[in-house]
Image: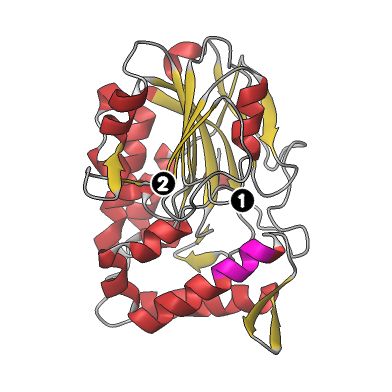
Amino acid sequence: MSSNFGSTFKNPLTKRRYGHFTMIRIRFIHLIRQALGYSAVRVIIHPFVYVPMVVIRAMQKRARVKTLSRSDVTLTSAAQLDSFFSLFTVVKTNIPLVRIGGKGDGGYIVPDDFDGISACFSPGISTMVDFELAMAHRNIPSYMADASVKFPPTDNPLFDFEPIFLGAQTLPGWISLGDWVSDKHPDAGDLLLQIDIEGGEWPVLEQVSSDLLRRFRIIVIELHDLHELFDAAKFTKIHDCLAKLLEHFAIVHIHPNNIQDEIEFNGYRIPPVIEMSLIRKDRVSQLSPIKNLPIALDRKNNPHISDVLFAPYWYE
């Protein structure tokens, strides 16, 4: 999993949302996890205290449930949730799927339709570039952006890196997707977008134009905070961003990140984080609903803790 965790916690809006102390504490945990590897069973949160990942996951779940239970939160109706999942259909196409990147975290299942793609745009690399190296092996250059690191962990002649965050607007230290593509690859040609920016994807999706989205043949995106679908005030944002994507793209695979546990309400179980792969509809000639998930190519993000499995309403 590529990560742009630093962008979330350097954003002044995030400081107001989480509080300074919590922000520092979570950032510390994240840095330790980076040092040990994302598949580590334990994370250090005190010089002499180790907490199993299952405990961290349970603590995160309790905190999310507590937030949704606040008196100032209006919960989403069952009818609204039904409307969201009526959009969310995963399909099988005439293009086979392949696994790109790492065997666990950092690997994604994507349509094998890379011939003719002129570039990959990959914001939020953090310390992992397995996906971008796989693109380089296919002679596809990758444009990378992440201000939480000074440079990629591996050098490659097909890598173009900038220490900047992707955002809804171009501001000091930030660049919009439209400006980034215009700066780096203004020429015509299909592109690939691989985006994992720790919740920053929502304002990017809200602001991006449909014309720009159509430049991407394949989109691989990690969606964060999906449990906020249960919050009526945030439901519309997530619903509308998905509807914008599905106007021109079909979902060909989804995978829950098992680092975080599901939240359940109104008959639906929602993982806070999922990986989603889409292909532009003009690239496929056959579309049929899939029957089962996971598939043989799927791997747990963290192999040491229990998996999260999608209920059929996620893909049927």
Marker disc for residue 310:
1
> Of residues 71 and 206, which is closer to you in this image?
206
Inspect this view and state whether residue 230 appears.
Answer: no
User: Amino acid type of disc 1?
Assistant: Phe
Residue 31 drawn in magenta: yes
The x and y percentages for residue 159 are 53, 30
> Of residues 288 and 1, which is closer to you in this image?
1
Residue 157 drawn in magenta: no
Instruction: State whether residue 143 is above or below residue 8.
Output: above
Instruction: State whether residue 292 is above or below residue 167.
Output: above
- Secondary structure mostly taken by the magenta-highlighted segment of the chain: helix
> Of residues 86 and 163, which is closer to you in this image?
163
The x and y percentages for residue 206 are 26, 43
Write down the region rendered in magenta. 30-35
> Of residues 228 and 195, which is closer to you in this image?
195
Q: Quadrant of residue 204?
A: top left
Quadrant showing the C terminus: top right
Q: Quadrant of residue 14?
A: bottom left
The x and y percentages for residue 118 are 48, 15
How many labels, in total? 2
Instruction: State whether residue 245 is above or below residue 95.
Output: below
Residue at which label 2 appears:
163
Q: Residue at x 29, y 47 (%)?
A: 174
How many residues crowd mark 2 within 10 Å: few (<14), some (14–19), many (20+)?
Answer: some
User: Amino acid type of disc 2?
Assistant: Pro
